[in-house]
Image: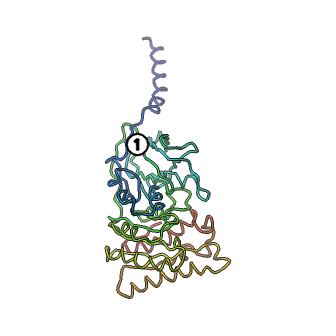
Amino acid sequence: MNAKALTFSLLIAVHLCPLMAADAPLHWIPLPSSQVQMDGLPWYGENGGELFRLPAKLKDTYHQPVWELAQSPSGGRIRFRTNTSILAIRLEYPGPPSMKNMHAFGQTGVDLYADGVYRGTATADQDAKAGKTSEYTYFKDQPRIDREITLYLPLYMSVKVLAIGLDAEAHVRPAKPFAVSGPVVYYGTSITQGGCASRPGMSYQAILGRMLNLDFVNLGFSGNGMGEPELGRAVASINASCFVLDFAQNNPTVDSLTQVYAPFVEIIRSTHPETPVLLITPIYAAHESWSRDARLEGMRELIRQVGAKRIAAGDRHLEIIEGTDLLGPSRGDGLVDGTHPNDLGFQWMAEGLAGRIAKVLGLRAER
């Protein structure tokens, strides 16, 4: 080969190499996998890798709406550390987003945070249906450096995470440990479940988790966080670092809340006598700017009384948190529909809770 032809061949090779690298097939890690960590779903292994928030073996003991909502993996996170130059995900959704008061990304999205920084969201499209696989690439052609990866799962729709795609040369290592060994377990209503965050990483539990480096379990059930004893037993079965209870508003009346509230707290306390328990009274609702809401006020007072009675009896690990201190009358801009927080509202709630949770866990709150 003469010098001119050799030079031409080398130039072609140089220009083709980046294209060949970009088109190289991904290495797909099928889930479940021991290479990645699933957090926030205590029954993940027991449920055979299904992304359910409650144990499937007990599904017939829950009200049907609770079990249906438990199939949305709110609070579930996939975590690992990798030096991959490309990151993709393969998903299957049962249908398209359909909620009126919630962004499609919040309902169906899978958020990527790399080193604690938001990078993108995979979401269901309008043609999503069972059996249809979709793929989403979060980033590609990035420097090969170690990154802490967290994928937040959807707040209000079930999903199958089929696989995670990396470049073939990437290594996968364990995610960094949390600040404390047990998760903070939240039980409550649609607000607890994540309504109406714009995407999964913006629920107040997710924000708090990043602020304090905490694991968490989300057992909020939209319209159905009523304090049933079977849910109390599910909550109490988790070896938590702290329990946060915020389930008043789904009860129709103060009387109905009275019947379940103290017994629910007792179920938790009888199993975990020294674990911190935080009782949150209802946050502000926009209609309270016009008129007094005797139901919400009565629920707030009931929670205060239940908590005060236990504290007076010697419970040194129980605290009452006023919901209106987290999101009160001066913070109406933090609401979507007059009831549910938006991202701003959830940020305020997380900031208001951070100091209290940090204190009971012996941590330093950071922002």
**Residue neighbourhood size for the residue with mark 1, other residues' Cα within 10 Å, grouped as few (<14), some (14–19), many (≥20):** many
Mark 1 — residue? 84
Which residue ends up furthest to the front in the rendered image?
A: 60
Q: Is residue 91 left or right of residue 35?
A: right
Percent x, y of residue 155 = 50, 57
Quarter residue 101 falls in: bottom right
Q: Residue at x 39, y 52 (%)?
A: 79
Is 276 in front, or is 82? Answer: 276
Is 297 in front, or is 361? Answer: 297
Percent x, y of residue 124 = 53, 47
Percent x, y of residue 290 = 68, 77
Which residue ends up furthest to the bottom in the rendered image?
A: 312
Check the image and report above or below for 89 versus 287. Answer: above
Which residue ends up furthest to the right in the rendered image?
A: 290
Check the image and report above or below for 41 versus 130. Answer: below
Check the image and report above or below for 272 versus 78. Answer: below
Q: How many marks?
A: 1
Quarter residue 70 falls in: bottom left
Check the image and report above or below for 73 versus 277. Answer: above
Quarter placement of the N terminus: top left
Q: Secondary structure at mark 1?
A: loop
Color scheme of the displayed model? rainbow
Q: Residue at x 58, y 58 (%)?
A: 102
Q: Residue at x 59, y 68 (%)?
A: 339
Percent x, y of residue 185 = 40, 67
Label 1 amino acid?
A: Thr
Q: Is residue 306 left or right of residue 297?
A: left
Q: Residue at x 47, y 41 (%)?
A: 131
Q: Is residue 177 left or right of residue 63?
A: left
Which residue ends up furthest to the top in the rendered image?
A: 1
